[in-house]
Image (cartoon, coloured by chain):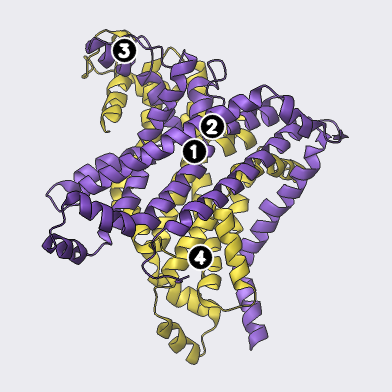
């Protein structure tokens, strides 16, 4: 019977295992092979030893791509987390019409990124864009959002914050899972708003905060469409994100070897990030039912 | 939050002159509906729509069958090595497709799949995405084991339990997975950008991306094209509103 159960089990999960082998394990090996070759997709791959790997240290664009990606991540993820948490606490009540507000805040996060990029490119237009129209109306300066290396990245971060609704909905679901009785008990003990937030909401929400943090990091490291469509990596490479740089190297410069090397770099960064997040933050997360798998 | 939408619609209905007026008007006078016609005929958008729908539908079929089978195996069958393989699911959950983009391109080139929808659909028949496997497994675990035991006593096979008990009882979860899969396919740019080479195979996302390159000054037409791409998403949202939130609530994030 055990044998039969094993066979049945593996039959059920075989789509995943096959997929893991075909679309992850084998590609990883191919990437390793490519990283030691020069290949432009057309002629035969040429063995170049470690030269692609050495290029990592002399390539002036890679630090730029890392800087843009890291800056984008360390600003947009924490700010997005605070905003989405704040919104969720505000919208976590039973007032009439609250559903409309939830919809309004959630909707931008399901808009196709290509459409959102077109819209925001227009909104940030220096001469006629609505953002500058409003700033100038309030007596502010005309900001060259997408033409200036120092404003393009902030513009793309602002666009990313338009999408906090996805994280907000997850927070909202978490908040609704906290039994009212905890708050009622705290109120009897004379706890104020801040105390309740600090000692009930935050500890009970820590798994959800953790989840949103990890997802936020992983998503923001993959930022591509905004840089590709709105600024094309510019100006002066200020928005040349890592994925955009890999895409350009592989599919525009047809340098598959170096693109494979950079894919490995991205892979190591994501593994490292996940590890750090789990090691240092994951252990502080409060779980109501420890050991539940 | 909603204002950029209003601005999108407003800009899409303005004449070429009015769109560059300062200060701008919120309500176009007169509204130029012709912009939508021009946007749809500038490139074969109806064809792109059809291509996007075909890809998205195939993705939904692939993901629902593949991830539900896998999730059932992880949720209900105690086989040797189950924890190891579920660990692999969690690990790949954290690894985005992007890291394998370059080597996968090599595989699909060798298989002769480039310039067809195969690279954008066939891989999803294998596994269907770690997140979906995780979500469905969590959901399956909430269905009482006694139901399955009763069926087993009556001589039902594991596949029969999956097919006749699990799937019908999991409709909300399967609909949630379908909706998010459809949206992901509709929104995807990097996949079509890499694999689709001839205009007959393009998706709406590529069509709009090309629009931006070719029509930088025609903001009115660009906004109309963007509105056309957003419309199906909004319609889907209003029809399936409760599933957007349900999927997250019912899964729980603790496990």
Q: Is residue B2 above or below residue B88?
A: above
Which residue bears the numbered disc 2?
A69
Q: Residue at x 38, y 28 (%)?
A: A158
Do tags 3 and 4 sit on the same chain?
yes
Q: Separation of disc 4 and disc 1 at Cα? A: 28 Å
Which residue bears the numbered disc 3?
B19
Q: Label 2 marks which chain's residue? A: A
Foreground disc of the pair 3, 2: 2
Lateral position of residue B82 relative to residue A286, left or right: right
Which residue bears the numbered disc 4?
B68
Badge 3 or badge 4: first in the primary sequence:
3
Q: Separation of disc 1 and disc 3 at Cα? A: 33 Å
Foreground disc of the pair 1, 3: 1
Q: Confirm or deny contact between disc 1 and disc 3 (CB under 8 A).
A: no
Q: Separation of disc 3 and disc 4 at Cα? A: 49 Å
For chain A, what colour was chosen?
A: purple
Return the mark for residue A220.
1
Q: Separation of disc 1 and disc 2 at Cα? A: 8 Å
Q: Is residue B43 visible?
A: no
């Amino acid at each position: 019977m055990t044998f039969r159960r094993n066979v049945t089990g593996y039959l059920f999960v075989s789509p995943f295992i096959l997929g893991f082998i075909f679309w992850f394990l084998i590609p990883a090996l191919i990437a390793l092979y490519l990283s030691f070759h020069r290949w432009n997709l057309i002629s035969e791959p040429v063995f170049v030893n470690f030269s692609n790997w050495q290029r990592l240290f002399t390539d002036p664009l890679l630090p730029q791509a890392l800087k843009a990606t890291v800056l984008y991540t360390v600003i947009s993820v924490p700010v997005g987390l605070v905003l989405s948490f704040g919104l969720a606490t505000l919208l976590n009540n039973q007032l009439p019409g609250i559903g409309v507000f939830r919809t309004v805040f959630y909707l931008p996060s399901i808009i196709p990124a290509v459409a959102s990029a077109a819209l925001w490119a227009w909104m940030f237009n220096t001469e006629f864009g609505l953002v500058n129209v409003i700033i100038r109306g309030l007596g502010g300066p005309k900001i060259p959002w997408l033409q200036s290396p120092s404003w393009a990245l902030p513009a793309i971060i602002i666009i990313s914050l338009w999408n906090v609704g996805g994280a907000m909905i997850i927070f909202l679901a978490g908040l609704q899972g906290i039994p009212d009785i905890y708050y009622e008990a705290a109120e009897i003990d004379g706890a104020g708003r801040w105390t309740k937030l600090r000692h009930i909401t935050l500890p009970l929400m820590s798994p959800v905060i953790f989840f949103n943090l990890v997802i936020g990091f992983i998503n923001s490291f993959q930022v591509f469409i905004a840089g590709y469509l709105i600024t094309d990596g510019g100006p002066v490479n200020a928005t040349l994100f890592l994925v955009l740089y890999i895409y350009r190297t592989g599919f525009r410069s047809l340098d598959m070897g170096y693109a494979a090397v950079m894919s490995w770099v991205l892979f190591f960064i994501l593994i490292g990030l996940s590890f750090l997040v789990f090691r240092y933050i994951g252990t502080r997360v409060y779980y109501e039912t420890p050991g539940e798998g | 939050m909603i204002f950029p939408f209003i601005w999108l619609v407003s800009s899409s209905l303005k004449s070429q002159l009015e769109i560059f007026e300062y200060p701008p008007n919120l309500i176009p006078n007169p509204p130029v509906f012709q912009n939508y016609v021009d946007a749809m005929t500038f490139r074969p958008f109806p064809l792109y729509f059809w291509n996007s729908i075909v890809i998205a539908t195939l993705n939904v079929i692939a993901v629902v069958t593949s991830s539900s089978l896998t999730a059932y195996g992880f949720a209900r069958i105690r086989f040797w090595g189950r924890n190891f393989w579920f660990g692999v699911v969690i690990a790949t959950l954290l690894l985005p497709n992007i890291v394998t983009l370059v080597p996968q391109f090599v595989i699909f080139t060798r298989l002769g799949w480039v310039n067809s929808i195969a690279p954008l659909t066939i891989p999803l028949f294998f596994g269907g995405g770690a997140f979906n496997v995780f979500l469905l497994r969590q959901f399956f675990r909430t269905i009482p084991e006694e139901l399955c035991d009763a069926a087993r006593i009556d001589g039902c096979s594991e596949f029969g339990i999956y097919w006749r008990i699990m799937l019908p009882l999991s409709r909300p979860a399967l609909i949630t997975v379908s909706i998010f899969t459809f949206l992901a396919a509709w929104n995807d740019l990097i996949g079509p950008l890499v694999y689709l080479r001839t205009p007959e195979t393009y998706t709406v996302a590529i069509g709009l991306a090309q629009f931006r390159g070719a029509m930088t000054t025609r903001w009115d037409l660009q906004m109309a094209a963007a509105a056309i791409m957003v419309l199906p998403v909004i319609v889907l949202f209003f029809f399936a509103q409760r599933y957007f939130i349900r999927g997250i609530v019912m899964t729980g994030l603790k496990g």
